[in-house]
Amino acid sequence: MREIAGTMRLLCGAGLLVAAAWIHAQTAALPPAPHGTVTDLTPQPGFFTEPGIAIDPNNPSYVAAAFQDNAHAGYSTDGGAHWQVATGTESTRFRVSGDVSIAYDTHGHAILCYMAFDKLGTFNYWGHDSSRNGLFVRRSLDGGATWEANDIPVIQHDDGPAVPWEDKPYIVADDSHSRFAGNLYIGWTRWTLTDSEIWLTRSTDDGLRWSAPIEIDRHPGLPRDDNGALEGFAGTVGPDGTLYVVWAGDGWLQVATSRDGGRSFSVPRNIIHTAPIMFQVEDVARSNGFPQIGIDARQPGKPRLYVSWSDYRNGDVDVFTSSSVNGGRTWSAAVRVNNDPVHDGADQFFQWMAVDPVDGSVNVLFYDRRGDPHNRDCTVTLARSTDGGRSFTNYAWTTQPFYPAHAFMGDYTGIAARAGHVYGIWTTKPAGVKGTQIQIGSAYFGGDAADRQ
């Protein structure tokens, strides 16, 4: 019996080794991102997370990045070949600023959006015992190098017994040629003591003034930031100025549209039923699958919309997209973006999506654990679809894994794409230190590397 048991242990051990080698082979088999580079935007570790990135549509050699803590910005004027961190971007009136997003408007101005506050409310119940807080923007009139001295209030609250908590703002720029061209929109989650709500405001004067905000959901969510809430606002603008927005709530991705420049919105529609998009992955403080929305408007009158998100309908966490060819009335079945085997136990999470307005490709960035049989170490993968979102090719953007334990990784990554140039931004955890760093990856799906500028 001992001989049989020993033989079984050997067979089991051999099986595990084969399985581990096979999973490692899956990562090794990924092609590298074409003309791919990775740059440390923050060479020294700190507590840097939740980045975003944007390309100037008028001058694509200008790229701007945002990250926290506090609200910071970086910029490149040569198509991502070199990066610098700007100064003078964080609020001087509040103790903390973060949850950043960034966009370029039609003037080539970089607009940095962030929340600011003095202290958090009760953990995951941010509307309880919160401090004065608000949403603000800061403008760079030279594409990201220098920033105006004062933050511009979008909405703000003084201390009080039931102060709403304005959270997770995301800025959207209308760079179309419609009558609403130049509009800026900010959507976010408002936490109260009793619910969570999606609100939106707009600016028609280059971010100097912002309209009275309106609530655009019809059914508020639960008041806690750990499932059942309305969160994860994102938006995109069509060639006719239609604003399409998405968020997650009550197990669904919800979409609404505005055809009058953000003054009013359609009744939100549940479009994709998901597994919960707030979930735990091993050794990460918190994680989520907040959605994004993008548009391919190359065919006049026939725009194709895309949404992306991640959930654990397959047990481990996977990344998905869906598309609509009729203005968001109906949506395709979910397409799995990561191409490792289903049910292999590897998590892919913190995705972000960008649709290239020039070539129509769908580009998705995510953390990827397929290379670690223990489902702990992460690399960064870029997935790209050139067939209308029906299939995705996965590329290794990084090959050196990192272990994210004992670090807050935030809620977001970021990606931007234009004319085959793709820029990703993410948080990484260097080995042996407590802090985190922000990295920027670039890739080019075009001609020779010399054509990238």
Image (tube, rainbow, N blue to C red):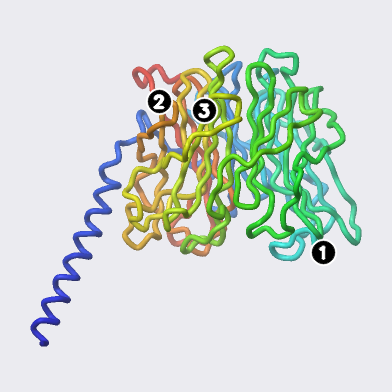
User: Alpha carbon of mark 3 to alpha carbon of mark 1: how far?
Assistant: 40 Å
User: What residue sits right under mark 2 in the picture?
Assistant: 386
Q: Residue 270: x percent and y percent?
A: 63, 42
Dot 3 or dot 1, earlier in sequence = 1
Dot 2 or dot 3, earlier in sequence = 3
Q: Residue 82: x percent and y percent?
A: 50, 30
Q: Amino acid at mark 3?
A: Val
Q: Residue 251: x percent and y percent?
A: 60, 51
Q: Residues within 10 Å of mark 2 (few under 14, many from 20)?
A: some
In this rendering, would 18 be left or right of 96? left
Dot 1 or dot 2, earlier in sequence = 1
In depth, the one of 414 and 363 nearer the eye is 363
Q: Residues within 10 Å of mark 1 (few under 14, many from 20)?
A: some
In depth, the one of 250 and 195 nearer the eye is 250
Residue drawn at point x = 81 percent, y = 28 percent: 263
User: What residue sits right under mark 1 in the picture?
Assistant: 129
Q: Amino acid at mark 2?
A: Thr
Q: Is residue 146 above or below residue 68?
A: above
Q: Residues within 10 Å of mark 3 (few under 14, many from 20)?
A: many
Q: Is residue 55 above or below residue 120?
A: above
Q: Nearer the viewer, mark 1 or mark 2?
A: 2
For the N terminus, which image quadrant?
A: bottom left
Q: Secondary structure at mark 1?
A: loop
Q: Quarter-wise, where is residue 162 in the image?
A: bottom right
* Furthest residue in direction front, as rendered: 330
In depth, the one of 452 and 274 nearer the eye is 274
Q: Amino acid at mark 1?
A: Asp
Q: Which mark is residue 355?
A: 3
The answer to whether mark 2 and mark 3 are in CB contact below 8 A is: no
